[in-house]
Amino acid sequence: MRVVQNTQMHIGEVDVSRILLDPKSRDDIPQVLRGLQQLYKDPATRAKLFQLLDSEIAPQIDKRTGRPGMTLWSIFVCGVIRLDLNIDYDRLHELVNQHNSIRQMLGHGLFDPTSYHHQTLKDNVTLFTPELLDKINQIVVEAGHELVKKKDGEVLRGRCDSFVVETDVHYPTDINLLFDATRKVIELTARLGSDQGLPDWRQHAYNVRHLKRHLRAAQNAKHSKARNEAQKATNDTRMIEAHKTYLEVAQGYLDKARETLAKTESYGGAGGVEYLVAKIQIETFMKHADRQIDQTRRRVILGETIPHAEKVFSVFETHTEWISKGKAGVPVELGLRVCILEDQHRFVLHHRVMEKQTDDQVTVAMVKETKERFADLEACSFDKGFHSPTNQQELQAHLKLVALPRKGKLSQQAQAVESSEHFVKARRRHSAVESAINALEVHGLDRCPDQGIRGFKRYVALAVVARNVHRIGAILKERENRRAKRATRYAQRDSPHKLAA
């Protein structure tokens, strides 16, 4: 059983719209709670948000039956807080159980002993899908536009740019990726053998340590700075032998794992969902290990250069890409590019996770998808990375003003376009998108801790929603500060009506 929000209030509970937040606090928590409160206070926004949460969170499950679970509003609040504060589930668990303002926002009163378990928070927040969060973001942005009093007919002017969101992986090399894959094969096969009553992997912990010793030997053999040619040749020979030994040890453990899988099938252990899941996991890591053995042998022993397309940069987060954007001090980033489009009110209208894509390949798609959500988008600025002759032509059909600078030497016609008043004005404003990117990175999108490409997309989408909610809270706080300053000036000014002391 699951409801959007409990309609019956309890003793000590405060209505969300009446929660008092410290106006002097400079922390992020009151700002994001102000944004959430604004979404709740507006009847139209609340109705649209609640209807969307009710219909799209776990739609295949009947929410009228079963044990009571977290309310859908509470799940939304927890997800937004986690991303806006850039925290893990451990700190979220502490905040939702101990922080008074957050518990009031979740619908718990002073005398309500309800607490949340760590796994409960994780299971419920992951119910969000990237598609649902995209729809929620549209509702949040529309509420933000109403707050800033966007006039009817006022056009939106966008700024589009991309940045890299890193995945939670270590620096990849052929041999440490081989260690990761083989270690998982040993551990998973040992667990499967234990469940089936096979004694083959009783020393699996020692096997992992044995494999790691050979990994360290191969790593140390590479770090030689000899200048003598004879010594260089000796070191190269030693490095090749260390790698050969390491590959032989890894291959031995893989062969032993295959024998164990064959035994479990011949002994009748095969069958059941758990066995099939374990077998698929083991075979997946075996494929990773076989690939790394082949690439290491080709690169170190045979002296080949491995094509970039054949490389994998993590056996756990296989969607990770090797990205070099030429930034000073950042030679390479491991993750995925994310493209965002922000409007003049500093709300992120749309985003896109770019899998094996570059900026120029998503330019038109970003504008078209944004206009499907916000039809009044009529201008947008880009940097040179988004340029291509095709993009220049196609964008003209969707926007009235396209501020997309061309690469290379400009023709007279292009110079006239790029020196026009509106183009120059848009280009000057374009750098403000870096502020949005920095805010997203500070509030969650520096590194994604969630697993899998689906988890990555959900994490990015939730970060965009959280950032827009935070922006609403920031606008409200600015207005409160201005009102407080006006009240202070009014109280301090001299008045002829004041009584003489």
Image: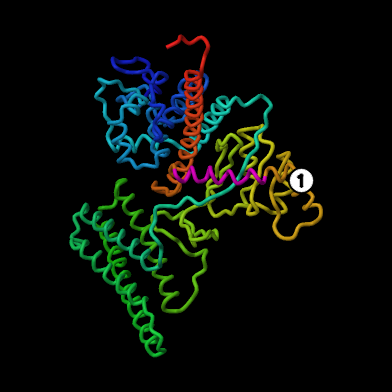
Res 399 quadrant in image: top right
Judged left or right of residue 389, residue 71 is left
- Residue closest to the eye, 185 or 229: 229
Check disc 1: other Cα within 10 Å, few if <14, some if 14-19, many if 20+. Answer: few
Q: Is residue 208 left or right of residue 125?
A: left
**Frontmost residue, 60 versus 367:** 367
What is the chief secondary structure element of the magenta stretch? helix
Chain part drawn in magenta: 427-442
- Residue 474 is situated, as x and y percent measured from the top left of the image, at 48, 32
Would residue 175 be counted in the magenta stretch? no
Front-most of residues 501 and 284: 501
Q: Residue at left 52%, top 32%?
A: 135
Residue pointed to by mark 1: 420
Which part of the image, by quadrant, shows the N terminus? top left
Label 1: which secondary element? loop
- Rendered-image quadrant of the C terminus: top left
